[in-house]
Amino acid sequence: MVSFLIATCRVTMSTAQQLRETGEAMGLKGSELVIFVREQQTLKNERKAKEDERLEKARLFELERARLESKEKEEARREREKERQLELKREEKASIEKEKERQEKEEARQEKEKDRQL
């Protein structure tokens, strides 16, 4: 926790300096200046936290959107595959039916040929 505070202080030192200079330019001194700088830093941190939260929500939204899109694509792929399988079955059934008809015609032809020979 202490190292985080030290790192935060290092990162915001220039900002704190700028805030101090702004407060001094406004005529603030002593404890009023310290309070001003702390309040401004708090406001900045709150804005940053809100922005981080907004960015995280946007990131999660995009992840969820991508997941749903992927799911929809997978469902569409499955549906296409199911339709393809049904079409193959129809074609196979038609082919079997055609072959059956051909065999029946061939048997009838052979029967005629047999009758003719007798």
Image (cartoon, helix red, strand yellow):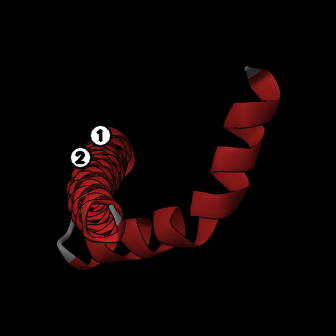
The N terminus - image quarter:
top right
Q: Residue at x 28, y 58 (%)?
A: 111
Q: Which residue is mark 2?
A: 50
Residue 32 falls in which quadrant of the image?
top left
Provide residue 76's location: percent of width, then percent of height: 22, 56
Q: Residue at x 36, y 51 (%)?
A: 63
Q: Secondary structure at mark 2?
A: helix
Residue 4 falls in which quadrant of the image?
top right
Position of residue 74 in the picture relative to residue 61 (left or right): right
Position of residue 118 in the picture relative to residue 105 (left or right): right
Mark 2 residue type: Lys
Provide residue 81's location: percent of width, then percent of height: 33, 55
Q: Earlier in the sequence, mark 1 or mark 2?
A: 1
The circle on residue 25 is none
Q: Is residue 58 visible?
A: no
Q: Residue furthest top?
A: 1
Provide residue 71's location: percent of width, then percent of height: 30, 46
CA neighbours of label 1 inside 10 A, class few (<14), some (14 to 19), many (20+): some
Per the model, the C-alpha gap separating discs 1 and 2 is 22 Å
| Circles 1, 2 touching at the beta carbon (< 8 Å) | no
Q: Residue furthest front?
A: 118
Q: Which residue is mark 1?
A: 35
Q: Is residue 17 above or below residue 54?
A: below
Q: Nearer the viewer, mark 1 or mark 2?
A: 2
